[in-house]
Amino acid sequence: MKVALVGVPAYAIFEVEKTFLQAQGIFSASTYVLFLTTPINVILCYVLVWNPKIGFGFLGAPAAVCITYWLQAVLLTLYIAYVNGKQAWCGFSNRAFIDWGPMIKLAIPGIIMWAAFEILSLAAAFISSNALAAQSILGTTTSILFQIPFAVSVAVSTRIGNLLGAGLVKSANMAANVGTVMALILGLFTWAGLFLLRHTLGKLFTGDAKVIALVASIVPLVAGFAILDCFSAVAGGILRGTGKQKIGGCANASSFFGFH
């Protein structure tokens, strides 16, 4: 945890800069940075974790992630400064420390939306080792799959926000409809993929027959959940684009904390 905390400021800088660019309609910059840093992270993980000469085991993994986070922040900063995006930067002044209220009101519901998912990690401490292993496999899988509809939600959120800001309500409504259709398509593909690979998924993570069988038995349920997860992600993007994060935060908090 101490090592991982070193990368938190860099992660925050990268996310803020990414949103700063997306608000200007510049979506490719962060993608370029991620394409560059992802293979570097893989190399760093090998060198710092498994390399017999300079690797230092478990602590090497968070160290590699921290280095990658800082590299991402620096590269995106350089992109803004020398390539594109600095047009909207008016310089730093003491005005940055005033009128935080509206920003905090928008941020808190978003924090609640993400914090609601963390209840799964807390609940995992109360189940058996096999169930915990299966939950870890399925949790990792769904987290990876969630990145696809989440990417759509980011695009939809930014698009709707820009259109509403320009007074183009009908176009914003069209963007919301397109996002919803994409959520349905992605959900169906995700459901089909998980269902067809239900007996193979567990084998990618472990050789324990009990865990593999448990994963295979739960995957059909998770596959159905994946469809709803796609809709939830895109709906969250629509709500963020219209400035109604509070609805999504309350819905996620009540669902996860209430039902779990």
Image: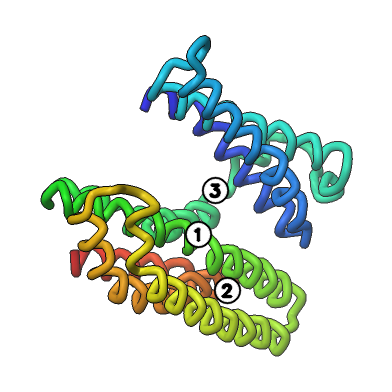
Question: In the displayed structure, does residue 183 sit left or right of residue 200?
Answer: right
Residue 119 visible: no
Q: Residue at x 26, y 58 (%)?
A: 212
Q: Earlier in the sequence, mark 2 or mark 1?
A: 1
Which residue is tagged 2?
Answer: 242
Question: In the displayed structure, does residue 94 sit left or right of residue 250?
Answer: right
Residue 85 visible: yes
Three-letter amino acid code at disc 1? Leu
Question: In the displayed structure, does residue 141 sit left or right of residue 131?
Answer: right
Residue lying at the far top in this picture: please name it. 53
The answer for how far apart the CA atoms under marks 2 and 1 are is 11 Å
Mark 3 in CB contact with mark 2 (< 8 angstroms): no
Q: Earlier in the sequence, mark 3 or mark 1?
A: 3
Nearer the camera: disc 3 or disc 1: 1
Three-letter amino acid code at disc 3? Trp
Q: Earlier in the sequence, mark 3 or mark 2?
A: 3
Residue 172 shows which numbered tag?
A: none
Depicted 90 relative to depicted 224: above or below:
above
**Image quarter hosting the N terminus:** top left
Element class at badge 3: loop
Which residue is tagged 3?
Answer: 100
Q: Residue at x 82, y 48 (%)?
A: 85
Which residue is tagged 1?
Answer: 106
Residue 27 is situated, as x and y percent measured from the top left of the image, at 74, 58
The residue lying toward the viewer, choosing from 108 and 74, is: 74
The residue lying toward the viewer, choosing from 9 and 184, is: 184
The residue lying toward the viewer, choosing from 136 and 174, is: 136
